[in-house]
Amino acid sequence: MDDTPKESCGVFGLYAPGSPVSHMVYLGLFALQHRGQEAAGIAVCDGDKIWVDKDTGLVSTIFNDRRLHTLQGDIAIGHTRYSTTGSGDWSNCQPVYRDAGQHQFALAHNGNLVNTAALAADLGLDYDGLGSDSSVAAELLARQLTTTRPATGSSALVEAFISVLPQMSGAYSFVLLGSGCLVGVRDPHGVRPLFLGKLDNGWVLASETPALDVVGATVVREIEPGEMVVITDSGVESRSPFPAEAINPKLCSFEFVYFARPDGNLMGHNVHRVRQRMGEALARQSPVAADAVVPIPESSVPGAQGYAHESGIPYVDGFVKNRYIGRTFIAPTQELRRNAVKIKLNPIKENITGKRLVVVEDSIIRATTLIETMRMLRDAGAAEIHLRVLSPPYRWPCWYGMDTTDRSRLVAAHNTVEQIRQMLGADSLAYLEIEPMLEAISPTGTKKLCTACLTGDYPIPVPRNDIGDKIPAADQSVVASR
Ligand code: SF4
């Protein structure tokens, strides 16, 4: 039903003695809800013990004032989850808690490890019975603590974490909670974002800058790829768990295309403005005569604004999106499912009937919902539909924290652009080419972005047998028309 890409998670951490930390984490998780709607959790340290409360569902349905009041302490972390490894049931909710002898900790993870099976085998764990890659990461740290039996104290926990991190391959932004310390770390490629913010009486870590805004923190900076920050009563210490040659920044370009909130900044660039620039570039690359530019809400709105601005074609709203609907809804028959799409997105016929439309979409992953959306536009009387996509064809699976590891479900992996155009019933279809997309994101940072799902160039080795062959150059056109 819902074929938009799903992010694997959002993480949040807070070191703020004297503040209502659980309530503040709750606000931060609200701001990160878009990164995962399957589950959420909060862990708080009261200086002695760590208390964890987590469940499946939305942040607003899990937590209430009473539950938050039971989570008292000075340091806390939180997590919103969408499962890209492991099932979406309670056992895989995060933060993951471990009691490792003299050390207790809680861990929250955004991203995906790519060597989970090998790590599990090394630990003697049953890979198939594993909860998730995050559970394996926590187990790795717990084993390190129980086997080496370091002294108590936050520095011992930090040193143990540093010693196990190089064993993990893949994408991760972790926040770790221990007695007296909050730790944040990004993998050496920095595939997933993580920011440091400052409060009057403490510090905040968050996947995106809007989550810092909602707790009144000022943005200090992004945690660097391969950097660890350790926050204690002494302040913030920056550590380097990885050798310099391992550092190779590759932030996920889909953070800009779809995942990240438009009011946030990444790599110093406002996400809303980046999406507008993508639309402007698409208008220059693939112009067409039309009466109106229509976004498919909501992440495509800035891109449609950019296309309209660059082309001079008026921007109009073509749909109303129901903001109160969850990620999925129940519809047992094909006919009901088709109609149910309208619960989520309903066309404004007055803006569509008889018009030649440029319809802007951020990406096409599986195309199932988009087929229904295009049909809605035809049914509403659109004279022509010219579909413009703000990113190149999504042809390869993502192993770094997006739910697209099954290549057979990626429509552009098995169809030419002309075939996709026919499938969608569009008069023309054009995707933004890779170079203009990267230029729109960051003219000076194009080499610092992961594009594996668009190019097949994986910055972190993945099981290539699961990826498939590259598309022949002759089939790599990004434009098709009737
Ligand atoms: S493969 Fe695509 S979705 Fe996955 S991290 Fe890279 S750019 Fe992002």
Image: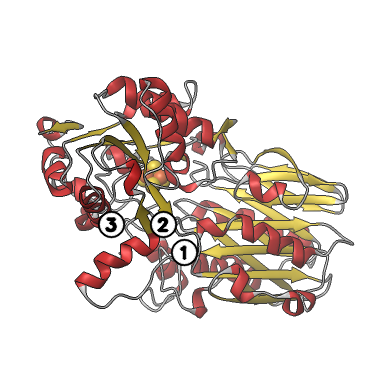
Can you tell me whether the CB of the residue at mark 3 lies under 8 Å from the nearest atom of ligand 1? no
| Residue 318 position within the rendered picture, expressed as x and y whole percent measured from the top left | 36, 44
Tell me the mark number nearer the camera, choosing from 3 and 2. Answer: 3
Select label 3 or label 1 by which is in front: 3
Q: Which amino acid type is shown beneath numbered disc 1?
A: Tyr
The first of marks 3 and 2 along the sequence is 2
Secondary structure category for the residue under label 1: loop
Circles 1 and 2: CB atoms closer than 8 Å = yes
Residue 448 showing in the rendered view: no
Give percent across and percent down for residue 156: 74, 61
Residue under numbered circle 1? 82
To which residue does mark 2 refer? 6
Q: Is mark 2 within 8 Å of ligand 1?
A: no
Q: CA distance from mark 1 to mark 2?
A: 7 Å
Q: Residue at x 77, y 46 (%)?
A: 217
On screen, residue 302 versus residue 165, left or right, reads left
Name the N-terminal-most of marks 1 and 2. Answer: 2
Q: Amino acid at mark 3?
A: Thr
Query: Disc 3 to disc 2, how far (Cα)?
Result: 14 Å
Which mark, residue 288?
none
Sequence-wise, which precedes: disc 3 or disc 1?
1
Question: Relative to 389, is 192 on the left or the right?
Answer: right
Return the residue at label 3. 369
Q: How is the image coloured?
A: secondary structure
Q: Quadrant of residue 74?
A: bottom right
Q: Secondary structure at mark 3?
A: helix
